[in-house]
Image (cartoon, rainbow, N blue to C red):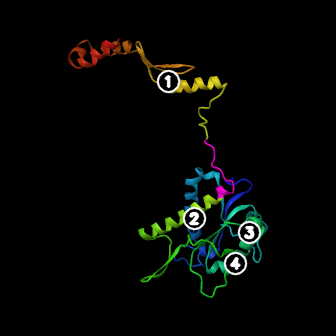
């Protein structure tokens, strides 16, 4: 289910698989699915968007973890997904610019939505680009709010990746939040609406409007004290607890008559007054 009407995906994640390796992993080794850098970013972005849209099932992020790309050209499935996506998030890096498939994804999206492309491409910078790298025109000119790397004069280049220091976690979270905020604003501008509140299915309101008003009034009715009993009144039934007089008599019979006068005179007096 997409948040924006008329689309199947709200967000299409475009990335090269070499950027989805876990930190310090070697490309020739098999890694656990979902543990890569891009997979973690998608997971945190999903959590951030869910807080804004209110329900996880009310939006859809498409993220290819099955390697549906063909050897030379985009597959029909990926091309269809792109054309039915409201926005595109490109995880840019030297590897991304070197990938013909990634470039094809970006160009197809830009070409398909040429007349309505404004603010629909979001560029996440995972790694700095080489000075002589040939830029991809469709990814130029976008806000530099989602840069997930820093240069430190002591440690040099540092990509924000787990595990990380508390200070870096703050930076990482802020940039994920920036991306989620801007995506949410764009999706809303394209017609996305927050889902309507769902009524509790365990207590549906049925019948005529007058009957529903009586139901609501009954549910708001406080606990009512009646002579000899406590009850909670509803339209259809009254749930009765043991009459106080009978309860007191039963307690006296079990304990003996001296119990009231010697052990709990105050409690017994309170029971007697109510009866």
What residue is disc 4 on? 137
Q: Counting residues from the N terminus, which is met first, the one under dot 1 or under dot 4?
A: 4
Element at label 3: helix
Q: Counting residues from the N terminus, which is met first, the one under dot 2 or under dot 4?
A: 4
Give residue 251's quadrant in the image: top left
Element at label 2: helix
Image point 56% across, 27% down: which residue? 216
Q: Counting residues from the N terminus, which is met first, the one under dot 4 or under dot 3?
A: 3
Q: Which mark is residue 221?
A: 1
Whether 128 is drawn above or below 53: the answer is below
Q: Which one is in front, 236 or 195?
A: 195
Q: Which one is in front, 74 or 88?
A: 88
Whether 6 is drawn above or below 102: the answer is above
Q: Are marks 3 and 1 in contact (CB under 8 Å)?
A: no
Query: Distance between the Cα atoms at labels 2 and 1?
Result: 47 Å
Magenta span = 187-197
Element at label 1: loop
Label 3 packing within 10 angstroms: few (<14), some (14-19), many (20+): many
Q: 78 left or right of 241?
A: right
* Image quadrant in which the C terminus is located: top left
Q: Which mark is residue 179?
A: 2
Label 4 packing within 10 angstroms: few (<14), some (14-19), many (20+): few
Give residue 49's quadrant in the image: bottom right
């Amino acid at each position: 289910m997409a948040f924006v009407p008329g689309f199947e995906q709200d967000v299409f994640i475009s990335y090269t698989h070499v950027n989805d390796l876990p930190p310090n992993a070697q490309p020739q080794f098999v890694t656990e699915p979902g543990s890569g850098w891009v997979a973690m970013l998608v997971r945190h972005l999903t959590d951030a968007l869910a807080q804004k849209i209110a329900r996880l099932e009310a939006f859809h992020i498409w993220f290819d973890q099955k390697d549906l790309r063909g050897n030379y050209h985009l597959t029909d499935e990926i091309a269809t997904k792109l054309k039915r996506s409201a926005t595109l998030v490109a995880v840019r890096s030297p590897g991304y610019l070197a990938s013909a498939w990634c470039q094809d994804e970006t160009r197809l999206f830009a070409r398909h939505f040429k007349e309505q492309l404004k603010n629909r491409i979001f560029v996440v910078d995972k790694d700095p680009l080489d000075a002589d790298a040939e830029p991809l025109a469709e990814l130029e000119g976008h806000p530099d709010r989602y840069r997930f790397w820093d240069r430190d004069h002591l440690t040099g280049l540092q990509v924000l990746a787990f595990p990380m220091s508390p200070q870096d976690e703050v930076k990482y979270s802020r940039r994920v939040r920036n991306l989620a905020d801007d995506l949410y604003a764009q999706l809303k501008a394209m017609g996305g609406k927050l889902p309507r509140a769902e009524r509790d299915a365990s207590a549906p309101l049925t019948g005529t409007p007058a009957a529903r008003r009586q139901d609501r009034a009954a549910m708001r009715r406080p606990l009512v004290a009646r002579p000899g009993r406590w009850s909670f009144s509803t339209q259809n039934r009254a749930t009765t607890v043991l009459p106080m007089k009978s309860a007191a008599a039963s307690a006296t019979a079990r304990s003996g008559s001296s119990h009231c006068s010697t052990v709990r005179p105050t409690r017994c007096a309170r029971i007697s007054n109510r009866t």
